[in-house]
Image: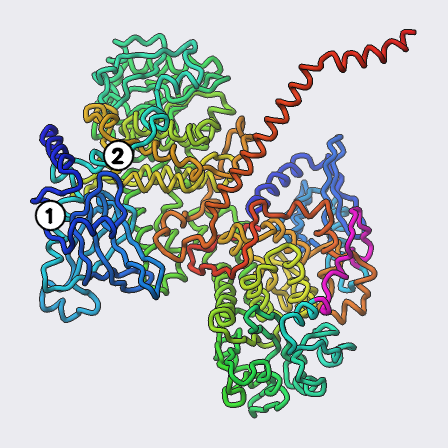
């Protein structure tokens, strides 16, 4: 199958800018004119251009008529500048961000009667919470053409087509190659490994131990690779406890795994019990291993019926189990859906009830619960010097949220731009958060119950922390928003597929670009001018209370033109960064001069001392 | 420091005091402060200004007597005192000392500054300076000394700026026609030549009285061609109701060039109740966090802020976009009117967004304009007394400015901490700036000569840098804020 796709790509690249004939459904313009209408990125080609009779129903500014252009990467609507009005109005959505396309209005005579309210056109629902409505003329079958093209291009997976990431041809300089930013080995070395008590294992180098884990794992030294195999049989999806982070001084660790397969038979595994005890023993300071189960207790109990469960105290005598009450992916999805409804409420009377509506979505409450659990973990690791083991059901959703957030709190490296990227690469991508399923990249089935905003929630939590500690993070809000944008766009290979194994199989690193390459080449845009490294050795413990959490309007409401910042904040920040760099350089220069002065005329000061001393001696 | 943080900190402190009560000797009661200090060698001292104490709550039980001092900046201090008698004495003296009515007994009259200052804040802002600036732009105005002895209007300053073509006799008539003698005066002159004026309501009563001089004065502002708007800060219903009490509003018939806009803002009493509910919600630890947002919403505080902001936006829009002059009044013209006119200037005039300009604005539009600080800030949200004259008009204004700071992080030279400080000093201060209700009273009590100005403090070399916004970049334009509910955050000052 893949070969076939590759062939197709070869085809289109051979033809250069020209699109194969069968690809063009209908266009109103010649090829030459197209590139003027829409800014394209390397590899992007115009597929459909409707130059007139399209109206966009903007929820904020009313109906706007303009041009609708569909390329193989994005949907682009614009109202070109006219001599009278210079401002261009543009709506742009990467096709993969679109979750559903529906025909609305005008189908029957009954709905034609209510034309004013439900005009003939298309509704496009997006993963970034936007819902776009386009109105078209009924006569010339434009709608059907656009509809079919969108159905074809928006859902490459359903249609067995390649992602645009494979077609994207941007050249990033080699030194900015984002695929080189993370190496598991380098990261573990940074953490101070190898240390006594822990060892690297290659047991998973062919993904045979656990197919959703990375190749390189760190496990307690006394456990042999055979032991690991035994343990893997007792853990859901073979996701055994492995090291995520180790405290540089106390050797307290954060380890992660999935639920034990206890089941209704109340099964036990001596191997697993011994293995968990080994994790505790690797930490010289601790007497008890803290197991954080991210789920509410009721859910953990319910999982027993499905063969899962939790560590019972009679089996794991040296551990203490703590439930964190974070709800599952379905609850979170529902909460976000409500948040979307609240954000885009059309009724102005709703403004009065904004806060209580917001409360009813429970979004901030869920954010709070997650932050509270992560804070608790960080606190126990730092002040209690305890080692912790974190899991939920499968250990790839809530577990990733909790481990990565507590690592941000504990280790200032993860608050730098580079460190944050490493964190995402490590805790989310390499440990198999199922981005493909949770986001539904290129998948038609928009009501798939596997979809959930787990990663978005994590980013929201990070944003909440940047609000509470505005000078502790090297990166800014724009980076977080950029990450979310490209989480859906499928422009980069970074967030494609479910796990390390799949990405390797598809040769993502070879065939696509990394989002971090983009970040790297435009680093200035994503740096926080107020960042001070004074927080380096600080453990940040945010206040996890709803009254301290804010609605992230710069992200969720960023489509509202009224929310656009009217000030050039970004430019100002860049200026400040420049000033900072300039001053830093000056300090360095002066220090160097000072050092040089102290070194070279070293005889000078000595002489004077000597001269002073002599009369005294006389 | 945020309200919540304050609270957390207090909670800490409170526990500290509870556990180490005997270490603290809280019985140092001076004339103006309650001083707590520890005796275990830590040099920890807490000074609480009596004026800052909103109320004292007594919790006596068998083994310990606790006093909770609730302050006007929403902090709470709890003390445990072994002896019942001591506790009672402290309580009654603090209670008595916290509500001294006479200004001359208050702390500003005894305070001697410990910082060096070059400028006397009382002399910084003068109507003459303002007038010289104005003369560069327009020759249609003059300074009137009609109020030199506060005869025309008790709450106006001695000198005000009025249209040049109107003589003092006409002003006198107009003053008789307006509530509390607050005749129309110039509040702001925009770069496009349009103005914002403010006054009290016209006393038309039910019989539809009119005053030729007042009509002439108002119409002359516009000139023959222009239109203007009268922004009434009451709903049209309550403006109509006011007629039965002798008040009223301008009819279109008598003021043909003016169009009326009603933008209902809440009265100071309602604002006070809202503040009380807000602070209650902030202090309430018992409720689980899930209820926080609905509590916040039901306090109505944010909608107060929102309405005030949108009223100011409306005026700014009329002036800047439509090129129309605006006259603002409510009933008395000392609360909502000032909120709107002051905020409009923050929006329109980049100068008002600098430190000095903002101080000047407060001096002119609040203190000299006769906002009754002494009555409005006599009690805050934690008082047991029933509110009568109290109202957080000034706090609402500062909150609005805070919201603007959030939306325009570069446009303000000062930071949000500065706003907190202002709010604190308005309620209880060692400085004389916010004493009394009007220029007249301040003169009677010789505030200028006997106390120190807060402005001297803010502009002194030591203090100034604390309140500057590090990412300030002066911007010359008008700023247009968003009044959508999700762009408003709770000001945790």
The x and y percentages for residue B183 are: 65, 80
**Left of A552 or right of it: where is A382?**
right
Q: Secondary structure at mark 2?
A: helix
**Left of A233 or right of it: where is A26?**
left
Q: Chain of mark 1?
A: A
Q: Residues within 10 Å of mark 1 (few under 14, many from 20)?
A: few
Question: Is residue B300 visible in this depiction of the protein?
Answer: no
Provide the residue designation for mark 1.
A24
Q: Chain of mark 2?
A: A
Q: Quadrant of the N terminus of chain B?
A: top right
Provide the residue designation for mark 2.
A435
Q: Residues within 10 Å of mark 2 (few under 14, many from 20)?
A: many
Farthest residue, direction left: A22
**Chief secondary structure of the magenta portion:** loop
The x and y percentages for residue A513 are: 28, 31
Q: Quadrant of residue B167?
A: bottom right
Total tally of numbered discs in the picture: 2
Dots 2 and 1 on the same chain: yes
Q: In percent of the image, x 48 and y 38: which residue is there?
A: A528
What are the residue bounds of the magenta stretch?
A: B106-129
Q: Find out whether residue A275 is within the magenta segment.
A: no
**Left of A373 or right of it: where is B409?**
right
Q: Secondary structure at mark 1?
A: loop
């Amino acid at each position: 199958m893949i070969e076939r796709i590759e062939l197709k790509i070869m085809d289109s690249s051979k033809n250069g800018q020209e699109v194969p004939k069968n690809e063009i459904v209908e266009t109103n313009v010649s090829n030459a004119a197209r590139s003027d209408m829409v800014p394209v990125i390397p590899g992007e080609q115009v597929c459909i251009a409707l130059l007139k009779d399209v109206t966009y129903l903007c929820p904020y500014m009313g109906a706007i008529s303009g041009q609708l252009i569909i390329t193989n990467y994005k949907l682009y609507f614009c109202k070109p500048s006219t001599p009278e009005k210079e401002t261009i109005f543009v709506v742009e959505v990467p096709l993969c961000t679109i979750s559903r396309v529906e025909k609305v209005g005008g189908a029957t005579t009954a709905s034609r009667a209510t034309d004013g309210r439900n005009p003939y056109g298309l509704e496009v629902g997006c993963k970034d919470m936007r819902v776009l409505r386009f109105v078209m003329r009924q006569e010339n079958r434009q709608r059907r053409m656009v509809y079919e093209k969108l159905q074809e291009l928006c859902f490459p997976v359903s249609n067995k087509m390649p992602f645009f990431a494979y077609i994207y041809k941007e050249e990033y300089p080699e030194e900015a190659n984002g695929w080189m930013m993370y190496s598991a080995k380098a990261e573990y070395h940074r953490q101070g490994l190898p240390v006594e008590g822990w060892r690297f294992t290659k047991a998973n180098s062919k993904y045979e131990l656990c197919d959703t884990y990375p190749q390189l794992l760190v496990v307690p030294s006394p456990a042999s690779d055979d032991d690991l195999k035994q343990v893997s049989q007792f853990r859901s999806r073979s996701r055994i406890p492995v090291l995520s982070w180790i405290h540089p001084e106390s050797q307290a660790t954060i380890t992660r795994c999935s639920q034990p397969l206890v089941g209704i038979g109340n099964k036990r595994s001596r191997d697993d019990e011994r293995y968990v005890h080994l994790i505790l023993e690797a930490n010289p300071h601790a007497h008890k291993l803290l197991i954080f189960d991210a789920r509410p207790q009721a859910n953990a109990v319910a999982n027993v019926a499905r063969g899962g469960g939790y560590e019972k105290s009679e089996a794991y005598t040296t551990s203490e189990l703590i439930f964190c009450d974070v709800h599952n992916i379905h609850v979170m999805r529902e909460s976000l859906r409500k948040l979307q409804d609240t954000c885009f409420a059309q009724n102005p009377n709703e403004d009065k009830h904004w806060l209580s509506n917001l409360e009813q979505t429970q979004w901030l409450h869920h954010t709070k619960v997650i932050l509270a659990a992560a804070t608790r973990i960080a606190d126990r690791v730092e002040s209690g010097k305890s080692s912790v083991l974190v899991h939920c059901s499968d250990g790839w959703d809530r577990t990733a949220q909790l481990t990565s957030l507590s690592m941000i709190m504990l280790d200032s490296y993860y608050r730098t731009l580079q460190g944050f990227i490493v964190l995402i690469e490590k805790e989310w991508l390499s440990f198999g958060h199922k981005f493909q399923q949770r986001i539904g990249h290129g998948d038609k089935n928009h009501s798939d119950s596997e979809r959930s905003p787990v990663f978005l929630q994590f980013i929201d939590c990070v944003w909440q922390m940047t609000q509470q500690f505005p000078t502790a993070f090297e990166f800014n809000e724009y980076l977080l928003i950029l990450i979310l944008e490209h989480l859906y766009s499928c422009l980069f290979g970074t967030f494609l597929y479910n796990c390390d194994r799949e990405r390797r199989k598809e040769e993502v690193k070879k065939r696509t670009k990394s989002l971090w390459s983009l970040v790297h080449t435009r680093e200035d845009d994503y740096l926080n001018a107020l960042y001070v490294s004074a927080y380096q050795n600080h453990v940040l413990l945010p206040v996890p209370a709803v009254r301290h959490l804010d609605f992230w309007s710069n992200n969720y409401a960023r489509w509202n033109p009224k929310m656009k910042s009217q000030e050039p904040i970004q430019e100002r920040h860049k200026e400040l960064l420049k000033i900072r760099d300039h001053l830093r350089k000056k300090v360095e220069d002066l220090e160097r001069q000072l050092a040089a002065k102290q070194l070279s005329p070293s005889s000078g000061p000595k002489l004077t001392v000597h001269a002073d001393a002599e009369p005294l001696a006389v | 420091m945020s309200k919540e943080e304050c609270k957390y900190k207090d909670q800490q402190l409170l526990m500290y005091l509870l556990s180490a009560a005997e270490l603290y000797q809280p019985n140092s009661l001076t004339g103006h402060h309650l001083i707590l200090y520890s005796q275990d060698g830590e040099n920890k001292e807490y000074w609480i200004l009596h004026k800052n104490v909103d109320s004292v709550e007594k919790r006596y039980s068998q083994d310990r007597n606790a006093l909770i001092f609730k302050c006007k900046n929403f902090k709470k201090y709890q003390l445990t005192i072994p002896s019942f008698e001591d506790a009672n004495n402290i309580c009654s003296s603090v209670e008595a000392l916290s509500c001294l009515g006479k200004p001359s007994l208050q702390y500003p009259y005894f305070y001697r500054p410990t910082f060096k200052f070059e400028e006397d804040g009382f002399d910084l802002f003068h109507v003459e300076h303002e007038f010289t600036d104005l003369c560069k732009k327009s020759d249609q105005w003059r300074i009137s000394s009609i109020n030199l002895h506060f005869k025309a209007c008790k709450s106006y300053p001695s000198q005000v700026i009025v249209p040049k073509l109107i003589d003092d006799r006409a002003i006198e008539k107009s003053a008789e026609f307006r509530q509390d003698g607050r005749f129309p005066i110039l509040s702001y002159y925009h770069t496009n030549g349009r103005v914002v004026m403010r006054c009290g309501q016209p006393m038309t009563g039910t019989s539809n009285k009119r005053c030729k001089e007042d009509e002439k004065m108002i119409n002359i502002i516009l000139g023959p061609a222009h239109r203007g708007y009268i922004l009434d800060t009451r709903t049209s219903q309550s403006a109509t109701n006011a007629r039965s009490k002798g008040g009223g509003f301008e009819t279109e018939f008598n003021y043909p060039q003016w169009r009326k806009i009603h933008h209902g803002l809440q009265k100071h009493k309602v604002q006070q109740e809202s503040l009380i509910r807000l602070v209650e919600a902030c202090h309430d630890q018992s409720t689980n966090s899930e209820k926080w947002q609905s509590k916040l919403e039901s306090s109505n505080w944010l909608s107060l802020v929102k309405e005030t902001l949108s009223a100011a936006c409306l005026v700014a829009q009329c002036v800047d976009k439509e090129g129309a002059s605006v006259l603002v009044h409510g009933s008395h013209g000392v609360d909502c009117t000032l909120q709107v006119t002051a905020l409009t200037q923050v929006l329109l005039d980049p100068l008002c967004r600098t430190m000095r300009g903002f101080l000047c604005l407060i001096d002119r539009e609040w203190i000299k304009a006769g906002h009754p600080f002494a009555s409005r800030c006599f009690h805050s949200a934690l008082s047991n007394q029933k509110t009568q004259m109290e109202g957080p008009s000034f706090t609402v204004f500062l909150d609005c400015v805070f919201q603007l700071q959030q939306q325009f992080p570069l446009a303000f030279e000062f930071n949000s901490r500065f706003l907190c400080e202002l709010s604190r000093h308005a309620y209880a201060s060692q400085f004389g700036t916010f004493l009394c209700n009007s220029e007249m009273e301040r003169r009677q009590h010789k505030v200028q000569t006997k106390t120190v100005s807060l402005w001297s403090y803010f502009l002194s070399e030591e203090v100034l840098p604390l309140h500057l916004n590090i990412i300030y970049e002066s911007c010359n334009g008008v700023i247009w804020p968003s009044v959508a509910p999700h762009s408003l955050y709770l000001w945790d000052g």
